């Protein structure tokens, strides 16, 4: 912490912050315990064509009261683009209280 109370990360320029996030977080956004070098966690589920991993979305969600909180998420990595597209299409209009909501995809993040 510097004399202004900022962490080393907070004291950096926006360009350096982006570099740090891009190199330490999956897609520059998600902390994935399965990717840790020491004591990685096991996947939640795996098939020959996909894998489901727990993660933390490091970009805080803003609550109605203005509080910002990190959120636990699951990432589904899929081998086939066709299967990915079908799954996204099938989720349109489903009740997020009954089905895990898709908050973003690799298309939204501009990667892959």
Image (spheres, rainbow, N blue to C red):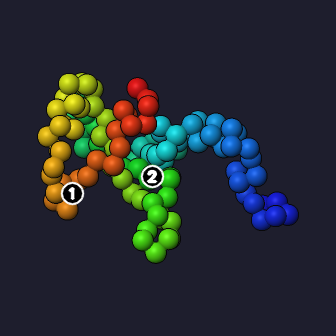
The answer to whether residue 98 of the structure is visible from this angle is: yes
Relative to the observer, which residue lies in front, 96 or 29? 96
> Mark 1: few, some, or many residues within 10 Å (few <14, many ≥20)?
few
Vertical placement of 97 versus 89: above or below? Answer: below
Circle nearer the viewer, 2 or 1: 1
Q: Position of residue 15 (x, y in %)?
A: 68, 38
Judging depth in this view, the residue of 84 and 46 nearest the camera is 84
- Identify the residue under disc 1: 96
The quarter of the displayed image where residue 21 is located: top right
Q: Secondary structure at mark 1?
A: loop
Identify the residue at horizontal 36%, vertical 32% (top origin).
107
Q: Left or right of 62: which side holds 4?
A: right
* Number of numbered callouts drawn: 2
Q: Residue at x 52, y 40 (%)?
A: 28
Residue for point 28% across, 47% down: 102
Tell me where residue 108 sits by quadrant: top left
| SS at circle 2 | strand
Question: In the rendered view of the protein, which quadrant contains the C terminus?
Answer: top left
- Residue 40 visible? The answer is no
Quadrant of the rendering where the N terminus is positioned? bottom right
Image location (x, y in percent) of residue 53: 34, 45
Residue 74 appears at what percent x and percent y?
33, 49
User: In this figure, which residue is indicated by the disc labeled 2?
Assistant: 57
The image shows residue 49, relative to residue 58, as above or below, that is: above
Mark 2 packing: few (<14 Cα in 10 Å), some, or many (20+)?
A: many
3D distance between C-alphas at marks 2 and 1? 18 Å
Residue at (74%, 44%) from the top-left corner? 13
């Amino acid at each position: 912490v510097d004399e202004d109370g900022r962490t080393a990360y907070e004291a950096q320029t926006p360009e350096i912050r982006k570099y740090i996030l891009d190199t330490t977080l999956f897609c520059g956004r998600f902390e994935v315990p399965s990717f840790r070098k020491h004591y990685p966690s096991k996947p939640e589920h795996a098939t020959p064509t996909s894998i489901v991993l727990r993660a933390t979305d490091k970009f805080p969600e803003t609550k109605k009261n203005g509080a910002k909180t990190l959120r636990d998420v699951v990432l589904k990595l899929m081998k086939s683009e066709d299967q990915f597209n079908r799954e996204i299409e099938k989720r349109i209009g489903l009740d997020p209280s009954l089905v895990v909501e898709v908050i973003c995809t690799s298309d939204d993040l501009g990667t892959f």
